[in-house]
Amino acid sequence: MKQVRLVAMSAAALAAVSMASAASAQELKFQFINPSFGGNPFNSDHLLAIATAQRPDKPASEDGTTGELTEAQLFARQIQSRLLSALSSSVVEAITGSNPGTTGEFTVGDQKISFERTLSEIKLTIFDNTTGENTVISVPVLNFSNSAASAALSANTSAESSLLGSTLTGTSSVEGSLLTSLTGQ
């Protein structure tokens, strides 16, 4: 019993001595490793090598290629992008240009694009004839607080809508000019 008591007292004394010693600690400092976020710039080569090693290989397609486009495919994609950009610029010009219409309709391939311009918004409806999908885009426009300016704007746009509506109904002149420039005629 004396031994148990001695062991218990020595354990208590050891615990008291260890708790009485001063605690020491450092300030925690965080620093990014990646140089893109302010870390050490000498880590960039190492991190790039690790990322490249972890990147999975591109799967080969059925014809054995890695899925990269040929120069002819890239050229065709760029031509298509430029033509669509020119067409969208023409649509935007018809809606918001110097002679904006209040309504209009364009046919581009299998899609019918129609717009309606009011004093508070421009409502653009895109209908895909192949899938039957209908997309509506509504964009708010500048609203004049002056009633005289609002009346002048509505009178101006209603007078021009008949002129622009007749040119935009059916196949648009924009589509015809693009097709003419593609065929070279």
Image (tube, rainbow, N blue to C red):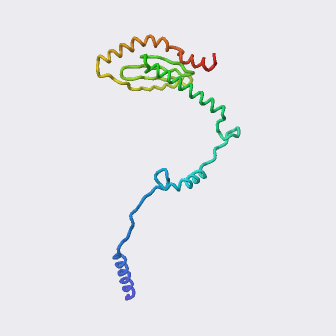
Count numbered badges in the picture.
0
3 up-or-down from 136: above or below: below
The image quarter in which residue 120 lies? top left
Which quadrant of the figure has residue 15? bottom left
The structure residue drawn at horizontal position 34% and vertical position 78%, both measured from the top left corner, is 16
Q: Nearer the viewer, residue 162 or 33?
A: 33
Q: Nearer the viewer, residue 1 or 127?
A: 127
* Residue 145 position within the rendered picture, expressed as x and y whole percent measured from the top left: 29, 22
Residue 172 percent coordinates (x, y): 53, 16
Q: Decide if residue 107 is on the left or right side of residue 29.
A: right
In the rendered image, residue 138, in percent from the top left (x then y), is placed at 42, 26
The N terminus: image quadrant = bottom left
The answer to whether 42 appears left or right of 97 in the picture is: right
Residue 18: image location, x then y, percent: 37, 77
Which residue corresponds to the image point at 62% horizontal and 20% vertical from the top-left? 182
Q: Quadrant of residue 68?
A: top right
Quick one: quadrant of the C terminus?
Answer: top right
Q: Residue at x 67, y 39 (%)?
A: 61
Residue reaching furthest to the bottom: 2
Nearest the eye: 152 or 16 = 152
Residue found at x 46% / y 13%: 165
Say if 72 sits above or below 54 in the image. above
Q: Residue furthest right?
A: 63
